[in-house]
Image: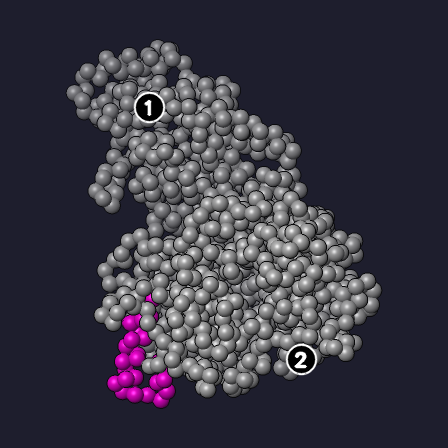
Amino acid sequence: MTNHWIDIKNADVILIMGSNAAENHPISFKWVQKARDNGGKLIVVDPRFTKSASMADVYASLRPGTDLAFLGGIINYALQNDRIQKEYVVEYTNASYLISADYKFNDGIFSGYDGGKREYDKKTWGYQNDDKGIPKRDKTLQDPQCVYQLMKKHYARYTPEKVEQITGCQKESFLKVAELFTSTCKPDRVATIMYAMGTTQHTVGTQNVRAYAILQLLLGNIGLAGGGINALRGESNVQGSTDAGLLWHILTGYNPCPEAKKHPNYEAYIKAVVPKTNDPMSLNWWSNRPKYIVSMLKAWFGDAATKENDFCFDWLPKAAKGTPHIVLFEDMYKGMLKGGFFFGTNPVVGGPNSNKEAKALEQLDWLVAIDLWETDSSIFWKRKGVDPRSIKTEVFLLPAASSVEKEGSVSNSGRWAQWRYKAQNAPGEAKSDLDIVNEIYEEVKALYAREGGKFPDPIVKANWNYKHGEHEHECDPHLVAKEINGYEWKTKKQMASFMDLKDDGSTACGNWVYGGSYPQAGNMMARRGQKEGPGGIGMYPEWSWSWPVNRRVAYNRASVNRNGDPFDPKRPVIKWNGSAWKGDVVDGGAKFGPEAKNPFIMNAEGVGKLFSNGVVDGPLTEHFEPKESPVRNLMNSQAFNPATKVLESVGGEFGDAGAYPYIGTSYRVVEHWQAGAMTRNLPWLTELVPDMFCEISPSLAKKKGIVNGDMVRIFNKRGSIQARALVTERIQPWNIQGKEVEMVGMIWHFGAGCAESGDSCNNLTPHIGDANTMIPEYKAFLVNIEKA
Amino acid sequence: MSDNAFLVDTTKCQGCRGCQVACKQWNGLPGEKTEFFAGPENTNPAELSAITWNHVKFFPIDRSNPDRPIWTIMHKKCYHCNEANCLAVCPEKAISKVDGWTIIDQDKCIGCGACVNACVYKVPQVSGIEHVNDVGQKIVKRDKSHKCNACLVNKREVPACVTTCPSEALSFGNRAVLVKEARKRVAEYKKDFPHACIYGLDEFHGLRVITILRDAPEKYGLPTGKAAEPMEHAKAEAIRDTYALLSTFTFGIPALKRTAYRLSKSLASKEV
């Protein structure tokens, strides 16, 4: 989230799209309700009439996988009707920047495309620079090569009629949404966007989020109270895990993982990952990256990390290739992996094409599952239809402590790191993840010491001290938190913030974005101060600690004009009084006044990118159909995202609308948690939702002779599952290109393990993902359905 | 006597059913074994029962105004009528008002089902099972009538269902203050939903659970007018008098008491 949960109450308009927040983030609605009580309006755009939709002032239905057509339509509506925040757009976005004359767009393909590789060379997506190397601008927005004009032309194709033909959303409904949402182009009217996996789990997932960014920049809604782009994270600490570098492509603090080919050494890595600018208005915050990398290496490798050996950069594993979830399991399927650790993860229920993923597990020599209970993944070897005797994998189940049985921080979607105390001891031999990891580390280190090995240094010389003494049994999470915060190497004094970090090895810091969470003064994350704070907008700056540097609203420099006056004086985030900033912790450092620096400090140009070379699949958004779609693409002659990679190994796993005419989509319900291991064992929750079910429209039910409660079979080339059918008016077909398009909605919480079992809908989801992130396309695929 | 009441605002209910679970957790009630959904949409179980004292019902979506489909999700528990039929008919005087709340004394209850039949909302239910919780307390007794006790038995300041509600669909406080708040909200809601109303102001001389509805009470099967008036005292008294006479021959045996009650009821109805 650029903003935070409480801040939702400040919004004049709330757009919930790609999320069913009322169902999956119930507490968020406390703030949505507050916004509505203050006269705010709620828009919900969703293929189903959901619980969120039931609370909406305006609801619009769209076919799964057509978000970019819908959002492109709103962008077009804003541009054609001049419903944009002009001052913001000119000053704080790249609307006025001139793009290379070689940039072209034709029939869904941007310039630089290599069809063989399904890849873009992004050279032509750059700016025209002046002789000082600063991008040229036309602040009148008239130059035909300026971003604003290129966008106007690009999005003119997204007419309301086209939106209706593609999405199935009636023109009137679409226009109602467009009108209400763009009403926040007034400087003091603000809209927020709440989104989740319904936005991201597509082959165009990143571009879906890009479209939100474009809209919010055009309307001047980023940086303001009640504004921003707010990703509702799917687990309580998934934000923290992202911050801590748990994803396949990043180290801690959003620094890229080194790759073998691109980054053979420290120098090459720094050259590749540190952006440059000649623009004096740009802070270009990532120019500080060497400080963050070196301090992280120092925290990890301690005394061994010296200037002479590039602070042990060479000790970091270098990826031979990007290995997101789908690639990992394809590799496992091919027998390329020896073993695996599953910390609270259950791919046999939650992974895409989960039949195949269960089969992939059979290739492992060993699997360690760390969980509260047995999960479908830890008992994959005795799943339906397999003979345990034929499976070689040795499986260990380590009992884990639950969240209330251990101390530590949990970072919520709003970037608040909240410290939790331990409420009670874990039962039996269950241990915290920290203690489990520590014991494994100590044992591996001892093995290296005893038996030697090919490359022991990164393990045996790691700076790893999380216990108060060698004979202590348990680690102290405070020691981990202190290392994450950072400290001066020599004195071991805790850092006040990341502003003190250096690239010479004199500072150590596990994760720069958490610099300031645990300074000399103590654990800021454990604070529970209840003062509302400046502006009366619910920032509560003394409650826990928010990264970075306790800033509550990211990009807040964009909430004021060049004089430092808030665009929205009723709900000021920050204000410049002529010599100093008041309000939230200002972005980019307090010493720069509003006229001195551009507000989007993480971009090399310092402004928001309407047109972006930061993504691999196009500088502007464009509608493509999902990989499996029941209709052809009306926007261009490409079927699905031309920059999405299709792994060779999955070639035969896709089906077409002939055999599988219905759209399949997956989602969660409030009563169950993720893959269900934690909730399918609880009778209070299984009373509410006892078994696997799907939702279909009355018209599809009639066509197939299905009545409410019937057991049905849903199938495609990847699998076949059984589910109960909930026939509901909340699902309605769309009229697309003259045909009725129906949908089968499925929950994905069920699997074979636990007290209440059922089939996983992920037996049906495909092994294909977004062009940038490879997040699986769980939200739009093809199935067929029949009465079981 | 406490002046407190519950306010249920169905326009703010997002159907998370936290109230249904919190009630079971706080009172140590067991989960019911269900299959698929017993009622419309996600409703489960079908209704209130002896082990489900707080229930959320999902109504089918109403698309009569295509621009503004209504999906009503309603929280239901004992309405704690000011003039409660259950109290009037209970032959053993097991039901009484405690601090304004309608409470069943489990020791006195004989499980005759008088209250079950008398309640137009179908709230109290006689249990066919016995349930002992994790720490050995007998939470649900067989052949006894059970329902919401406004968290008066396992005492807490604010009832569990209200505490857990994330969207302020449930509130708890002084009834007069809540009624005022409800009137204010309904005036606002009428702009979007012209038939929006408050239920529970006058029914059974005033309910302790006041509900804000987007549409008329009849749409949700809630009785109004004559159907929501307390039963005639004469009738209740006639049954009770007959029962008092007959029960002297039951020797305190619950099964006989139940038979005596059934007999009294049929005799009384013949007299009337």
Residue placed furthest toward the front: A579
Instruction: Examine the image and state in which quarter residue A102 appears.
Output: bottom right
Work out whether B266 lies above or below A58: above
Q: Nearer the viewer, residue B177 or A222?
A: A222
Chain letter of the residue carrying label 1: B
Kindly identify which residue carries mark 2.
Answer: A121
Figure check: A351 above or below B265: below
Quadrant for the N terminus of chain A, please. Answer: bottom right
- A720 relative position to A430: left or right: right
Residue A650, can we see it? no
Between B208 and A438, which is closer to the camera in this rendering?
A438
Q: Residue A623 placed where, x, y %?
A: 68, 65
Dot 2: within a 10 Å radius of its alpha carbon, few (fewer than 14), some, or many (20 or more) residues? few
Mark 1 secondary-structure assignment: strand
Density class for disc 1 (Cα within 10 Å; few <14, some 14-19, many ≥20) is: few
Does residue B53 appear left or right of residue A633 in this picture? Answer: left
Instruction: Report the span colored magenta.
Output: A433-459
Q: Position of residue A776 (x, y in %)?
A: 53, 68
Q: Is residue A52 above or below residue B257?
A: below
Dot 1 corresponds to which residue? B98
Image location of residue A458, percent across then percent down: 38, 82
Look at the image and tell me whether residue A590 can be seen. Answer: yes
Residue A13, horizontal then vertical, whole percent: 64, 47
> What residue is drawn where x is 64% and y is 55%?
A579
**Which picture quadrant has residue A101?**
bottom right
Nearer to the camera, A721 or A179: A179
* Residue type at numbered disc 1: Val
Q: Main secondary structure of the magenta part?
A: helix
Q: Amino acid under label 2?
A: Asp
